[in-house]
Amino acid sequence: MQTRIIGDVHGKYLSYLKLIENVERSVQIGDFGFGFGTRGEAKFIDSLIDQMHGENLIIRGNQDPPSEIARSSHFIPDGTIKNSTMFIGGASSIDRQYRIPGVDWWEDEQLSQDELDQLIEVYREKKPRVLITHEAPEVLVPILVRDSIFGSHVRENSRTRNAFDIMRTIHTPEIHVFGHWHTHMDSVIGGTRFICLNELEYIDLEI
């Protein structure tokens, strides 16, 4: 099915709503912005999405508190597989030392190692054709650092990125779409088409 995949929104809800007008199906790939406003605001935004045409889904980013985004009727839980497409949210915030826990940083911003290990086994069994995630594989970091605003600030490995590297050794997905890095990428590497979407950037794919 033709699906519009949309990059990070960062609370720019009106721009996002314009992107899903008259679209049969969309997937927003995290950092939507749930949790930065009041709880009432999140419920209001969810109601606006409800009024739009089509099926509009959202995975979580590192800037989406898991407990808050899970309240959305549009949320795709981590590890969901639909039509040979696997969805995994979460990432590590490189600027977390400047954030306030429970306000704009959450300890469970990425899955635990045990949770990721379980998803690796699901991936091994199902071998999805497409991966849609918030974060990228670790192997792409040298390319992404070169082109993104993060620059050389990325120092430490991420268990989420490492898990995606392990998945690639098990099975080569045809397409892997992600956001988080605030840059654009569309390249075939090792048999996979890797697509990084910048803020509010989108691509229409048959998935």
Image (cartoon, helix red, strand yellow):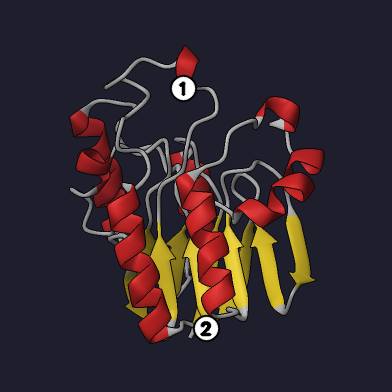
**Front residue of 81 and 155:** 155
**Front residue of 197 and 55:** 197
- Residue 159's spot in the image, x, y percent? 46, 47
Tag 2: amino acid:
Arg
First reached walking from the N terminus: tag 2 or tag 1: 1
Query: Label 2 belongs to which residue?
Result: 129
Marks 2/1: CA–CA distance: 33 Å
Q: Residue 96 carries which label?
A: 1
Vertical placement of residue 129 versus 80, above or below: below
Tag 1: amino acid:
Arg
- Residue 26's spot in the image, x, y percent? 45, 67
Label 2: how many Cα within 10 Å (few below 14, some 14–19, many 20+): some
- Residue 155's spot in the image, x, y percent? 64, 30
Residue 182 falls in image quadrant: top right
* SS class, disc 2: loop
Residue 43 falls in image quadrant: top left
**Front residue of 189 and 15:** 189
Whether residue 53 is visible to the viewer of this picture, yes or no, is: no
Residue at 27% in and 48% down: 46
Q: Residue 151 carries which label?
A: none
Vertical placement of residue 40 versus 111, above or below: above
Label 1: how many Cα within 10 Å (few below 14, some 14–19, many 20+): few
Residue at 56% in and 40% down: 157
Direction from residue 88 to residue 95 in the image, left or right: right
